[in-house]
Image (spheres, helix red, strand yellow):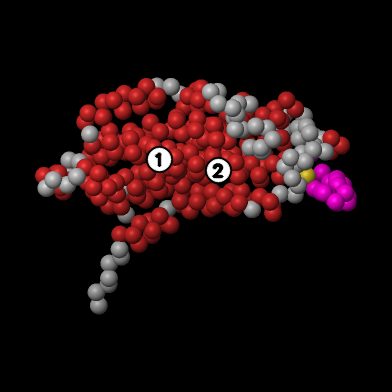
Amino acid sequence: MAIAAQSPFRQTLRRMFGNTSVRVGGTIALLILLMGLFAPFLGTRDPSDISPRNRNKTPGYEAMVRDYDGNKIPVVYRMGSDTLGRDVYSRVVYGARTSLIVGAAVAFLAIAVGLGLGLVAGYFRVADGIIMRVMDGMMAIPAILLAIAVVSLFSAGLTSVIVAIVVAEVPRVVRLVRSVVLSIREEPYVEAAITAGTPAPLLLVRHVLPNTVAPLIVQGTFIVASAIIVEAILSFLGIGIPPEIPTWGNIMAEGRQVFQLFPHNILYPGVVLALTVLSVNMLGDGLRDTLDPRFAKRV
């Protein structure tokens, strides 16, 4: 009896779930995503609640605090408290929300803008020179410096941080999409469509755009990791998201002055930040290997 061949989609899924980097990185990233989504249920206290009596407590410290009704309740500071008596554990949990929002928003916007510019630059030779010279000039500036320059033009906040990081990430997406378009437009079926008089917008959507999906998925994971790091750096420097909004960067910034005596203020958010970036990068590496046609031929 002949065995039905698996569809390309099923083969891709089989390779994806068989990749160790995808499994490990995806699992850790999913756990951190769930931590951010369910922060109100996982956090033990409001991350902004100040308790001067319980400032700079070590991990595992138990204290009696008053709830919103004025009743005293026992609270365990699982990761200790900071210099204002705020629960580090709750701030780290809520900080996952901010970092994931920044990473996802930056990846979406950078890909949306970069995809459009890359398609135009790769297909229209006249626009190519103009767009790519601008992109080259932007890439000549380190991403963190470009982000600092952009965020300094606006008031500190979540929106300005996202815009600043998007500006730094767009050139990389444009170059990626442009390289894909330049290779695809030389294919016989594309040349045949051009000869048949297919309008340029329809040609880009029907023949070129589908070939950019796999590279952009991989690039998107790396953009998420890069955006999380840049946001943490901006917040650590005090020019990113305001201190009243918990992020891993400003948690570490507030704890650096007492690091030698109370290292937990930097240790725990730093470990979670490192795990997040590592897991997203592992996921991106695994997806790159899975979606690479050359890899598919070797498997």
Q: Specify the segment rendered in magenta.
A: 57-76
- Nearest the viewer among 220 and 265 is 220
Closest to the observer, 71 or 292: 71
Give percent across and percent down for residue 219. 40, 41
The residue type indicated by label 1 comes to Ile
| Residue at image coords 45%, 30% | 167
- Above or below: residue 231 compared with residue 75: above
Q: Whole-percent x and y of residue 32?
A: 58, 48
The residue singled out by tag 1 in the image is: 111
**Vertical order, 284 against 18 (above or below):** above
Give left or right: position of 160 versus 253. left
| Residue at image point 78% right, 32% down | 83
Residue 139 within the magenta-colored segment of the rendering: no
Q: Find numbered disc 1 in the image and state the secondary structure of the residue it sits on.
A: helix
Furthest residue in direction bottom, as rendered: 1
- From the viewer's perspective, is residue 90 above or below residue 169? below
Residue 179 visible at all: no
* Residue 157 visible in image: yes
Residue nearer the viewer, 183 or 66: 66
Give the SS element for disc 2: helix
**Amino acid at dot 2:** Ile
Placement of the N terminus among the 4 image quadrants? bottom left
Q: Could you tell me how many numbered marks the image carries? A: 2
Left or right: where does residue 248 sit relative to residue 283? right
Which numbered tag is attached to residue 101?
Answer: 2
Q: Residue furthest left?
A: 195
Mark 1 or 2 closer to N-term?
A: 2
Residues at discs 1 and 2 in contact (Cβ within 8 Å): no
How dense is the environment of label 1, judged by Cα within 10 Å: few (below 14), some, or many (20 and up)? many
Quadrant assignment, res 4: bottom left
